[in-house]
Image (cartoon, rainbow, N blue to C red):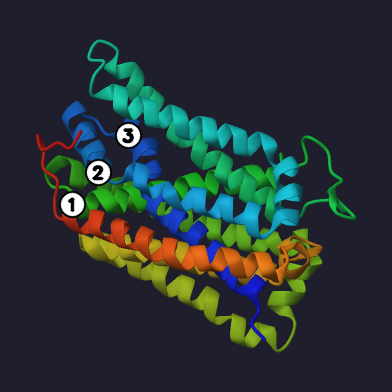
C-alpha cells in the first residue's frame, strides 16, 4: 500500500530545504551588506543574486501551499501558534524586495533603500529561525486546536535559533560571494565567511545540546540504544564538514566552501527530521494524523508530478545561464 502522507511529507521537506538553501544565501548577502565597505562592492554583491533571488522564493510558496493543501490539521495548528513571526517574516521579505528594486532607481535615497534591504533580510531570517525554534520546542494542542498563548513562540530558545539561522545565512551568503566575485569583495567575503563559519558551527552544537533538554522525545531518539550507535554518524559528519570548511577557507578555495556550507545546513536539517519523525507538529501530532484524505493526496500528487519538474528545470536553467563570476560594473537589473 502506498503511503501518500509520507510521500507528501518528503516533498514538502524537500521544498523547505530548497528554500532554506537557495533563499538563504541571498538573505545572507542582505544581512552582511552593511559590512561591505565600498558602494561598488555592495552593488556587485546585489548583482550576483539579481537574476535569481525572487525565483528562490518559489520554494517557500510551494512549501506553505503544500502544507495547507496536504496537511490541513498541521496548518490550522501551526499558523495560529506562529502568526507573529510568520507575518513579520513576510513583511521583511516584501520590504526587502521593494528595497532591492528601488536601490537601482531612487538615486537620492539609495542609502536608505540599502538599509532597508539589510533590515528586511535580517527580519526575515530572524523570524524564520524563531518560527523554527518555536516548532522545535513544541506546540500546545488540545484535540485538534492550538491551545497555547499569543507569546508562546517567543522564548530564549527560539530567539537563539533565530540568531543562529541568520548567522548561518551569512555563512551561505559570504561563501556564495567568495565563489562569484573577485578582488576586494571576494577578500571581504572570505573574512566574513571565516567568522560566520565559527559562529554557525558553535550554534549547531549549542542548539543540538539544548534540544535534548527541551523535549524527552528528542533525548530518547538520539541517546537510547541502539539509536545512539547509528545516529552518531550525523554529528560525526557535521564535525568532518566543519573542519573541511575551515580548511578550504584557509586555502582560499572558491567553490568548495559554498558546497560545504550547504552540507552543514543539509546535515542539520536531517538531524531535525530525525528528531521530529513521525511528528509533524511536535510533540503530539503525527504526519498521518495531520494528513488530508488519501483521495486528496493522490489528486494533488498528480499536479505535483507536473509542477515540480518544471520548477526544478527553470531553477537549474537560471543558475546555469547566470553561472560564472560577476565583476564590478556588470549588472542585471
* Residue that carries the numbered disc 3 in the rendered image: 33
Between marks 2 and 1, how big is the CA–CA gap? 7 Å
Image position of 171 (left or right of 156): left
* Mark sitting earlier along the chain (1/3): 3
Residue bearing the label numbered 2: 51
**Where's residue 28, x and y in %?**
39, 44
Query: Regarding mark 3 in the picture, which secondary structure is present there?
Result: helix
Crowding at label 1, few (<14), some or many (≥20) Cα neighbours within 10 Å? some
What is the secondary structure assignment of the residue under circle 1? loop
Residue 59's tag is: none
Whichever of labels 3 and 2 marks the residue nearer the N terminus, that label is 3
Where does label 1 land, which residue? 322
Instruction: Confirm or deny contact between disc 1 and disc 3 (CB under 8 A).
Output: no
Residue 67 is drawn in which quadrant?
A: bottom right
What percent of the width, then of the height, locates residue 292?
A: 71, 63
From the top left corner, tell me how far across and down residue 57 is, in percent.
43, 46
Q: Earlier in the sequence, mark 2 or mark 1?
A: 2
- Is residue 266 visible in the rendered image? The answer is yes
Q: What element carries label 2?
A: loop
Amino acid at each position: 500500500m502506498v503511503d501518500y502522507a509520507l510521500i507528501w511529507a518528503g516533498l514538502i521537506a524537500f521544498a523547505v530545504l530548497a528554500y532554506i538553501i537557495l533563499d538563504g544565501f541571498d538573505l545572507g548577502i542582505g544581512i552582511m551588506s552593511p559590512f561591505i565597505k565600498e558602494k561598488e562592492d555592495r552593488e556587485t554583491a546585489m548583482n550576483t543574486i539579481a537574476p535569481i533571488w525572487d525565483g528562490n522564493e518559489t520554494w517557500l510558496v510551494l512549501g506553505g501551499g503544500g502544507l495547507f493543501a496536504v496537511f490541513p490539521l498541521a496548518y490550522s495548528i501551526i499558523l495560529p501558534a506562529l502568526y507573529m513571526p510568520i507575518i513579520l517574516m513576510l513583511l521583511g521579505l516584501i520590504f526587502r524586495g521593494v528595497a532591492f528594486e528601488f536601490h537601482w532607481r531612487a538615486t537620492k535615497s539609495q542609502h536608505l533603500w540599502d538599509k532597508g534591504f539589510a533590515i528586511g533580510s535580517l527580519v526575515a531570517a530572524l523570524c524564520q529561525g524563531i518560527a523554527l525554534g518555536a516548532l522545535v520546542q513544541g506546540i500546545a494542542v488540545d484535540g485538534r486546536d492550538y491551545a497555547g498563548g499569543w507569546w508562546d513562540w517567543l522564548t530564549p530558545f527560539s530567539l537563539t535559533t533565530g540568531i543562529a539561522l541568520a548567522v548561518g545565512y551569512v555563512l551561505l551568503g559570504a561563501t556564495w560571494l567568495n565563489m562569484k566575485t573577485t578582488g576586494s569583495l571576494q577578500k571581504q567575503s572570505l573574512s566574513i565567511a571565516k567568522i560566520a563559519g565559527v559562529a554557525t558551527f558553535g550554534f549547531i552544537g549549542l542548539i543540538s545540546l539544548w534540544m535534548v533538554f527541551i523535549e524527552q522525545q528528542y533525548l530518547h531518539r538520539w541517546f537510547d540504544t541502539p539509536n545512539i550507535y547509528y545516529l552518531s554518524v550525523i554529528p560525526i559528519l557535521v564535525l568532518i564538514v566543519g573542519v573541511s570548511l575551515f580548511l578550504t577557507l584557509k586555502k582560499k578555495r572558491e567553490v568548495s566552501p559554498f558546497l560545504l556550507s550547504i552540507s552543514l545546513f543539509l546535515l542539520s536539517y536531517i538531524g531535525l527530521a530525525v528528531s521530529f519523525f513521525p511528528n509533524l507538529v511536535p510533540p503530539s501530532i503525527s504526519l498521518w494524523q495531520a494528513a488530508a484524505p488519501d483521495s486528496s493526496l493522490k489528486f494533488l500528487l498528480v499536479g505535483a508530478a507536473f509542477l515540480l519538474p518544471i520548477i526544478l528545470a527553470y531553477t537549474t536553467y537560471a543558475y546555469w545561464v547566470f553561472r560564472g563570476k560577476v565583476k564590478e560594473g556588470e549588472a542585471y537589473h
